Amino acid sequence: MTILGIDTSGKVASCAVMSGDKILCEKILYTKLTHSQVILPMVKEVMSGCELGWKDIDGIAVANGPGSYTGLRIGIAAVKGICMGAPGIRCAGISTLEALAYNCLAFQGRIIPVMKARPKVVYAGDYFSDRGKLVRLAEDRVAGEEEFFAALDTSEKIMLTGDHCAEIKKTYFAGSENVILAPAADRLQKASSLCAAFMNAPQYEAPPDKLMASYLQETKAEKDKAHR
């Protein structure tokens, strides 16, 4: 399978093409959340660099959350548009946290991806990497960071990744040798990890009109509506 990955869930925009276990091309750009301006030109550049057309793409994987409300909608809308215009291309929405765990697939042990949601509140996942196979240990969640990390069993090695992992390590696990940080290059979103997740978990495939963002918490519009 040749998979295109698109991630607009955070501060970076990322696009990649992966064929089998080979990354043919990947581009990651720190955009300060201007995803609408950069993601489609990035897709065009990556595919052009690989000398690929839409007929060569079997599927598209997109980050479906958690993450930036606007960013997620931009990426999902782009994939819906592409797949509706090219019905032969399959698509899948992949958890941003699961994709971050795929960044650390070479690590043997428990992986905790953590992203900042708002002050003292995090999006957190709980995964285990075993010989290159990723297993979800618990559902992704939004939680108070102190509540989540105070209950973490650190008797075995744990790798933290995600945009908030360095702060979590410093605040809660500064003295723990068992809680380690992912390499800096593996702490932010990578579209190639979305591709790998799609290939390893085809159950995420969905019709383009069924692609939806998973925010894990109410959007501002939902909160405003509830308070009217």
Image (cartoon, rainbow, N blue to C red):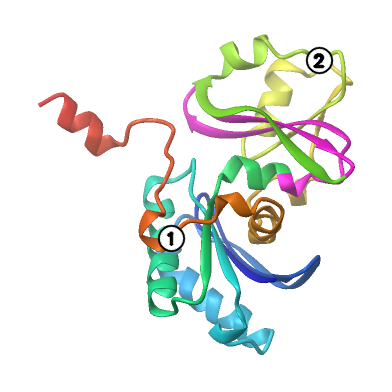
SS for dot 1: loop
Looking at the picture, which amino acid does disc 1 mark? Pro
Q: Nearer the viewer, residue 11 or 105?
A: 105
Q: Residue at x 87, y 19 (%)?
A: 156
Residue 55, above or below 31: below
Q: Residue at x 9, y 26 (%)?
A: 228
Q: Is residue 189 in view?
A: yes
| Mark 1 Cα shell of 10 Å, populated few (<14), some (14-19), many (≥20) | some
Residue interval drawn in magenta: 102-131
Image x and y of residue 31, in percent: 52, 60
Number of callouts in the render? 2
Answer left or right for 178 relative to 9: right
Image x and y of residue 109, in percent: 85, 31
Is 106 within the magenta?
yes
Residue under pointer 1:
207
Looking at the picture, which amino acid does disc 2 mark? Thr
Answer left or right for 89 relative to 98: left
Q: Is residue 121 in view?
A: no
Residue 133: image quadrant is top right
